[in-house]
Amino acid sequence: MAAVYKTLSGTSSKSDQTNGASIKKNKQRVLILSSRGVTYRHRHLLNDLYALLPHSRKDAKLDTKTKLYQLNELADLYNCNNVLFFEARKGKDLYIWMSKAPNGPTVKYHMQNLHTTSELHFPGNCLKGSRPILSFDATFTTTPHLLLIKELLSHIFGVPKGARKTKPFVDHVMGFTVADGKIWIRCFEIRETQLAKSDKIVNRTTANNIGDAPSNNSKLTSGDDSNITLIEVGPRFILTPIVILESSFGGPVIYENKEFVSPNQVRAQQRLGKAARYGRRSEQGVERRARMGGLGLRSGVGGGREEGEGELEDRVLFA
């Protein structure tokens, strides 16, 4: 029976391929993990993304921050072809690595303005395991590196149809917008509400008054009895691309953001600014004491004028 089943299944698959009925499936699986030193906000964001991506798998923390090529072995072990790695530094800065394992490419981002779902307290909600609609800004088609980033984001955040733990619903939208050289990511719920009778009458009258002859759009608006709105769910964050590597967690650099400023350099500039302000204040104090000393008004340690023994002192009069 096994031989008969193999022969029948082989002939059926061959016939389907010859008839052109075989459809290529979109098989995408994402491995999500973090390094040591992440804060509670970083951990909450990782959990939010894991809940939004039903085709993802969460793993334990990675012990090393230098040997990132080990992530390719982990992805192969868990049968994942995408890696989303959270790298924390100094307990403050968070860097995101997005890679296509095992051949690449790899994009490194710096995350800013992080807000988790529990922090925002938005009224929106979406079904766990549902598939999102990915909305990309038109700026992604202007430069080659943004096209590559768009393709990588669509592979990671686009939940394939029929994937593990997915539900046959589409009830939220993920928006990707480019502004000031940064990628702004938002998540919205698609909420459909039933219109009242008065609103239905107004919509039908406006649809009839748009044109002389009824069109297909007017039929759709007159027959539609629901209102669709977008309500933000969360999380929200901003990604700044730093470098793009040719292979997975290695290889030559094919793009580098020259305008990126490291947060360590920003903090160093702030410390230098505070030191310069302190130096100016101390110099002003020295100049003030010098001017008062030149006028004979130099104050002593106690803050008053220096006292000397005059002719009317008690010790002089009653000596």
Image (spheres, helix red, strand yellow):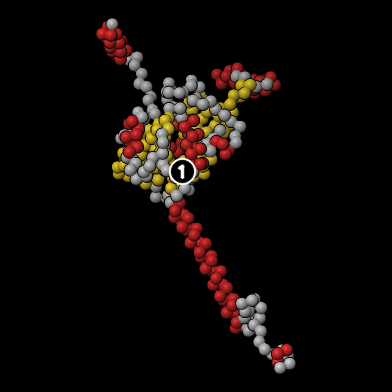
The answer to whether any part of residue 203 appears in the image is yes
Residue pictured at 60% horizontal, 36% vertical:
121
The answer to whether 206 appears left or right of 54 in the picture is right
Which picture quadrant has residue 82?
top left
The answer to whether 304 appears left or right of 248 in the picture is right
The answer to whether any part of residue 254 appears in the image is no
201, above or below 265, in the image: above
Residue pictured at 45% horizontal, 38% vertical:
139
287, above or below 81, in the image: below
**Which sits in the foreground, 228 or 24?**
24
178, above or below 132, in the image: below
**Which sits in the foreground, 134 or 202?**
134
Residue 297 placement (x, y as % from top left): 64, 81
Residue pictured at 55% horizontal, 27% vertical:
126
Residue 69 placement (x, y as % from top left): 32, 40
Q: Which residue is label 1 attached to?
A: 38
Residue 70 placement (x, y as % from top left): 32, 38
Count the labels in the image. 1
Residue at the front extreme? Answer: 319
**Which sits in the foreground, 166 or 185?**
166
Residue pictured at 69% horizontal, 19% vertical:
197
